[in-house]
Amino acid sequence: MKRSSLILMAILMILFMAAAGDAKTRHVQDREYYKNTIAAARETIWKALTDGHGSCATVAVMDNGRLVYSECFGAAERATNRPVDKNTRFNIGSTSKMFVAVPILLLVDEGKVSLDEKIVKYIPDFTMKDERYKDITVRMIFNHSSGLPGSTFYFGYEPDGGMHGLLLDNLKNASLKHAPGAMSMYCNDGFTLAEIIVERLSGKKFMDFLAERVFKPLGMKNSGPSVGECGSKNIAEYYDLKTGKKYPPEIVEVYACGGISSTAEDLCRFGNSFNPKSKNKLLSAASLAEIRRNQPYRFYNELKHRPMMSEFGWEYSNLDELEAKGFQALGKGGNTICYSTNLQILPDEGITIGLMINGHASGEALTRPILDALMKDKNLITPPPVTAKKPVEAQKVPEDLLKFAGIYAKSTAPFKIVFNKDKNGFEIYPLEPAKKEKRSGGENAAADKNNNEVKDGKIHAAPVIAYVYNAGFFHNFEKEAKCYFAEIDGRQYLVQHKIKTYGVDTIEYQKLDEIKDPVSFKTDIAGKAWLVRNEKPYVLAGSIGIAKTDFYEELPGYVNFAGVKKIENPEYAGIAVAVFRDQADLRLIDMNGETCIKTNYGLCSPADSARKLITGVNRVVIKSENYNEWLRVEKGAIVNFDKPQKGRIIVVTEENAIYDSVVDKDEIYAPEGSFIFCAGTAGDLFKIIAR
């Protein structure tokens, strides 16, 4: 070997050793400099895991483009003890929404999209029964003010490829919750429309566009479709938090609203692209300013403090305590059935935090202590000392507020607000259905189970919460809750003030109108249970359950079926409350001689028309319509199953699924009142053996 070559090799070896030494030194320095950040991350994540919110997690912190901390916790796969590493993918849920916000703005930069243009210009086949849909703009998608009713998709275990068609078909007969641009309420479907816009204007599949225009330029090598579709073996498996059963990898095919998988480090690379000093910016200066600025809607100034989701895709574009010190913070969380994620950035300070867990948790609540510690490490903010508080002194409620008593609704049920006898506060009671289902265990057992009270031999609902009045607000000391009433455009609301973690105001209840001439359905369906008939064999078990139609003596003209609806004619009930997510109208339809329910994309038939499970062999065949078939368990029995290879069997009670053929192989005891769900394709034969 020539002498010059030996010298070159020696120099390279010295440089390599020096670089390795520098990296080790920097790592040691980082551990010391960011010691509070690291401690907060470890304490927060380990607490979440040991409290049962998940079985593995990962977190990363980037400071001005440099990863200064990245750590993984727990086993990604238990049987092999495969640990989570920096390349392990998690589904990021609604954090995906920022991955369509950027492509839309890239198209804005290219002059292909205008944010204030109507959606129908870009998607001509987007139509709705409600003519106001023509006024929905692209911008309204991103501050959730479109008025679109909800979420039209399902979580599954196999790719489907039909989500765009499902949404557009479903919207044809749907109504808006409110006028476009009036108020903001979380809406997934708008982001699927944005995904369609990207595909139509770019001529590329959405994930291909992301790979080319976002993932590759930012070096995001471990990001793509959801874990069940991405093809990577290095994924965080999901284990049921109660049973510990391992489920197949989750597939979410509405990519823009919740279907991307990634890593904490890749999320940081994405977050750093919003840093104005970053070398890896994707957007123009104008679009960077757009995605960071507040996007108010008409209701915005009607509340006492800023509401949530008045931003361009983010959940917030400021936090009070940071804004007071001159720092802008942006955050976006995401939850699927199996995963929780959060991304927080302070773009001007170059701070980005990404966090993921395979379970159910508030990603925002897990990430905030890490951000607080990081701000302390960087000497940007010193957290104030924690001080004790005492209950406020109850004051008499002003006379003009007493008009707010009445019946209100949340997203899923009606409640009654009653001012107490001392007129220094109010209590909230659940409204009891007019026709109750039979309760087992005796009257007192039912009362105890539901936290109700028994008086004079009758069950009376206990209040879910009580508030006292003081200085313009109502307070509950135990839950650290604070609220007020608001009247906007003639409607009355109960608004939570500066809710924990986010510090924003959010409408919690909407008062229901009193109907002078209530309409009834053509068929008496009060207290009936309903079973879904058109779910795919590969949906997650959480989509399968028993729904009920409840009516209330104090609320004539309304029905509660996955949300309170106003009966408008003998066959139709429309959305009754505008300020809650995932609402849908309800239609009574005739199917094979019986009355069924159509709502959103779901089709349901009465539970009492399901075949009765008999002792011995029960044969079930999927008919030509591919509708799901059900068996009704009137007497508890031990059951086992013989099913087609791609068929699905789930046993459900009123509370949850107790058997799922995706993960359960042995027989099970099906209790009285449970139901057996069978899903497959036309001609599939199922055998359910009961003894």
Image (cartoon, grey):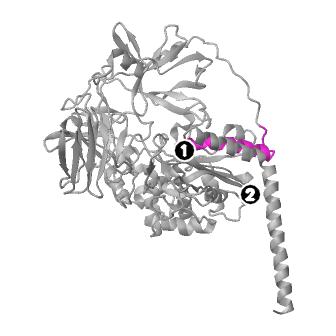
| Residue displayed at 47% across by 68% down | 202
Residue with the most extreme bottom position: 2
For residue 469, the mark is none
Q: Residue 8 or 467: which is nearer the viewer?
A: 8
The answer to whether residue 309 is seen in the rendering is no
Quarter of the N terminus within the rendering:
bottom right
Q: Position of residue 24 (x, y in %)?
A: 80, 61
What residue is disc 1 on? 54
Left or right: residue 125 versus residue 229 is left
| Mark in front: 2 vs 1 | 1
Left-right relation of 553 to 284: left
Mark 2 residue type? Asn
Residue with the mark numbered 2? 64
Q: Nearer the viewer, residue 148 or 36?
A: 36
**Which portion, as a residue range, is magenta?**
359-382
Q: Compared to 84, does 505 lie above or below?
A: above
